[in-house]
Image (spheres, rainbow, N blue to C red):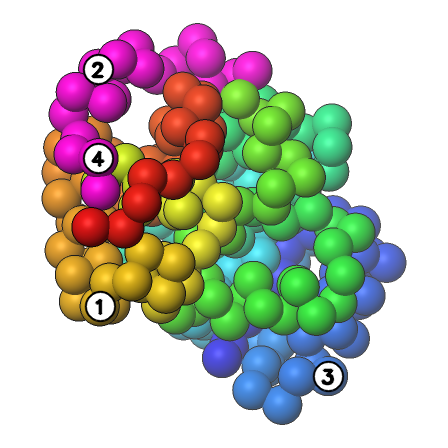
Amino acid sequence: MRVVICDDQGIVREGIKIILMAARDIEVVGIGSDGAEAVDLVAETKPDLVLMDLKMPIMNGIEATRQIVRQHPEIPVLVLTTYDADKWVFDAIRAGAKGYILKDTPHEQLIAAVRGTVAGQSHIDPDVAGKLLDQVTRTISLLPSDVEKKLSERELDVLRLIAIGQTNGEIANSLSLSEGTVRNYVSGILTKLEVSDRTQAAVMALRHGLTEELSAPE
């Protein structure tokens, strides 16, 4: 997996590079210090994933994410964030980021997040998800009752598990379903909620408190 890292702090860039390069299946193909450099590096290297800081000079991570997603929709952006960057994180997700991870995340979790995002999953760090909800409140128009009316009970079960970061395989095990059935449920959920990916669906679920106890398997 080929990764571009973009962060305006040199010690953060080098630290993340060392962590990722320790994994045999990950190669760091570019390092940038601002969003403009990230956009150029992506065009030059065509990586499998971009790790993107948000608060940077010249061009911030939100605008860089927006440009990368528009120009290279096949390349996912995983946001690097801190506890004080909640609104910026949500804006980055709206710009097309596939998820977010804290800069002080343990090494093995960072590597797992990179692998999962490249594989098509959306990574939502539970430590910052709750704080993000304050920003989501002002931007999501559906009421909780609207969400529940749009989805079946089993779709709600799947959505709750998406919201806590489970993969399709884990959801299948949790609900005693096949992965193919889970994929169909996920596709239906995205269509019914009018969102483009799992991250946006998860944020909506968290916003509306849909992570209560799951119903019994069918």
What residue sits right under mark 3 in the picture? 22
Using residue 125 as the reference point, say whether residue 154 is left or right of it: left
Q: Position of residue 102 (x, y in %)?
A: 69, 47
In this rendering, position of residue 30 left or right of residue 76: right
Instruction: Tell me the residue at 20%/50% (across/down).
Output: 218
Q: Which residue is mark 1?
A: 178
Q: Nearer the viewer, mark 2 or mark 3?
A: 2
Label 2 vs label 1, nearer the camera = 1
- Of residue 35 and residue 47, the one placed in the foreground of this image is 47
Return the disc, 1 or 3, that comes first in the chain's sequence: 3
Question: What amino acid is labelled 4 in the image?
Answer: Glu
- Which amino acid, mark 2? Asp
Which callout, 4 or 2, points to the residue nearer the camera?
4
Quarter occupied by residue 117: bottom left
In this rendering, the answer to whether 89 lies above or below 7 is above
Tell me how far mark 2 sits from mark 1, CA to CA: 28 Å
- Which mark sits nearer the N-terminus, 1 or 4? 4
Q: Secondary structure at mark 2?
A: helix
Question: Which amino acid does the dot numbered 3 rest on?
Answer: Ala
Label 3 secondary element: loop
Residue that badge 4 annotates:
153
Which span of residues is magenta-colored? 134-154
Element assignment for label 4 = helix
Do labels 1 and 4 touch, CB within 8 Å? no
Marks 2 and 3 close (CB-CB < 8 Å): no
Residue count near mark 4 (Cα–Cα under 10 Å), binned few <14, some 14–19, many ≥20: some
| Kind of residue sitting beneath label 1 | Ser
